[in-house]
Amino acid sequence: MRIVIKVGTSTLTHPTGRMDIRHVETLCKVLSDVKNAGHEIVLVSSGAIGMGVGKLNLRERPADMATKQAAAAVGQCELMYVYDQLFGTYNHTIAQILLTGEDLRDEHRHRNFSNTVERLLDLNVLPVINENDTVSTVEIGVGDNDTLGALVAVSVKADMLIILSDIDGLYTADPRREKSAELIAEVREITPAMRESAGGGGTALSTGGMATKLTAAGICMEAGTDMYILNGAQPLLIYEVLEGKRVGTRFIGRKTP
Ligand code: GLU
């Protein structure tokens, strides 16, 4: 199977912006093992700005564009260094791909991107993709990595997208506020009620939240690709998805007859 995994800043870093070593190490170990089992993995990883904030000892996520982009440039280096070390431990070679929304909207550049990913996968390399935050602005950007993950999954014709989040999946209401909120195991149709309860989102260091995950799910389902939301604090759940168990929330891709 070809699997795109999207991992968010809230999984990769502590609220301080420093790396969450336990999460990152377990994730790289599981993905290496899944790759050893014969699956193709593409990783869409956030964390550049978050790790840059940590490395530069900034007190919070910068609000101005220039500092944000500087933090991303510093953090992206750190991120790839860590991935290279950890995947290297298991003998896997990684590659960095940085994209903007324009790269995916422009047919020619989009084709170059998918050709490169195909070639990397042929070469048994694990591509690690992020938005090119140092040049991305609102006008040319994708904006968030959940959407980027979905666009990548569709464009590389993945069998599934797995989004690792700081929550177990999609709930009937915000479980942090409402005790009665229940986890939704399977979604065939994104309803207005789901969008409403998703609200805005993100944490101090990341941009996502549930709203962008529903956008990502919409893109995947439309293209016939399954998408899962799993808790990134438990990367071992990826094995359970591959074993066909019901974990997190599964958004079922539309099957065309
Ligand atoms: N590209 C951003 C980063 O690496 C993250 C964007 C997102 O998480 O949606 O920090």
Image: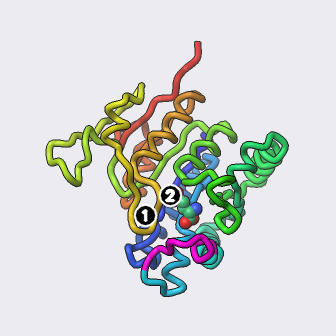
Q: Amino acid at mark 2?
A: Val
Q: Is residue 243 above or below residue 49?
A: above
The kind of secondary structure element at disc 1 is helix
Q: Which residue bears the numbered disc 2?
A: 7
Q: Quadrant of residue 17?
A: bottom left
> Distance between the Cα atoms at labels 2 and 1?
7 Å
Residue reaching furthest top? 257
Of 61 and 226, the residue lying toward us: 61
The kind of secondary structure element at disc 2 is strand
Image spot of residue 103 (x, y percent): 75, 50
Quadrant of the image where one finds ligand 1: bottom right
Q: Which portion, as a residue range, is magenta?
A: 60-69
How busy is the neighbourhood of tag 1: few (under 14 within 10 Å), some, or many (20 plus)? Answer: many
Tell me if I can see residue 89 in this picture. no
Give the label on residue 250, or none: none
Of 109 and 248, the residue lying toward us: 109
Q: Is residue 49 above or below residue 172?
A: below
Image spot of residue 183 (x, y percent): 27, 40
How busy is the neighbourhood of tag 2: few (under 14 within 10 Å), some, or many (20 plus)? Answer: many
What residue sits 64% from the left and 65% below the top?
133
Disc 2 to disc 1: CB gap under 8 Å: yes
Q: Quadrant of the C terminus?
A: top right
What residue sits 52% from the left and 23% below the top?
254
Question: How many numbered marks appear?
Answer: 2
Image spot of residue 27 (x, y percent): 48, 62
Q: Which residue bears the numbered disc 1?
A: 11
